[in-house]
Amino acid sequence: MLGSVSANGKRYEKDDNLKIVLQVKKELEKQKVKVILTRKDDTFVTLQKRCQIANWKRADLFVSIHRNSAKSGDGIEIWINNKSDDISEKLANDILKEFEQTKFQTNRGVKTGTSDNNGNDYFVNRNTKMPSCLIELGFISNTKDNQLLDEHLEEYAQAIAKGILQNLK
């Protein structure tokens, strides 16, 4: 499964997600944090399996990284469960606060539920048993967001890692 694809059809969300996740893992491991990945390579893992892995391993936090896509839009937003606990909300806000120190367009904020406002939650936020958030790391359909991700990948990974670390203390 590819996820979203850029306008020119040459950039795949799955590749961007893996690049940033591996960099976040590297940043966290520098701080002696044990990181459990639901995928380490270009293998497809269902959302159900991702949640199962996190729940089986009894992870302290679950952070899912994605890229947004739309005809227009830019920036970073973080989604949490409608019935979110304080830790999930703090995690999302701490990550966004760290992003403010990097170069990105719009802070689209912390949001609850899903983008279609149907009262549901994103699968990973609904089916994990620990505090969780889903990061939409810019729009793959936006050339500027893609450029910023490419140019600031390490800074973005550091921002996510710092936000996570603040919640593991």
Image: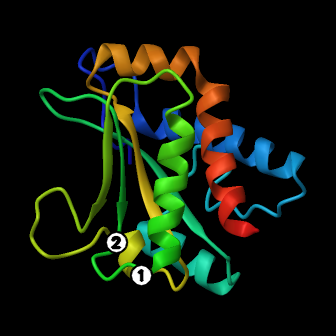
Label 2's element?
Answer: helix
**Residue type pointed to by label 1:** Asn
Q: CA distance from mark 1 to mark 2?
A: 6 Å
The residue shown at (23%, 19%) is 7
Determine which of the numbered discs, if any, sits on residue 86 in the image. Answer: none
Q: Can residue 41 be seen in this snapshot?
A: no
Q: Quadrant of the C terminus?
A: bottom right
Residue 40 shown left or right of residue 66 in the figure: right
Determine which of the numbered discs, if any, sits on residue 123 in the image. Answer: 2
Residue 102 shown left or right of residue 106 in the figure: right
Residue nearer the viewer, 132 or 91? 91
Q: Quadrant of residue 52?
A: bottom right
Q: Position of residue 105 (x, y in %)?
A: 35, 24
**Residue type pointed to by label 2:** Phe
Q: Position of residue 50 (x, y in %)?
A: 53, 69
Determine which of the numbered discs, if any, sits on residue 127 in the image. Answer: 1
Label 1's element?
Answer: helix
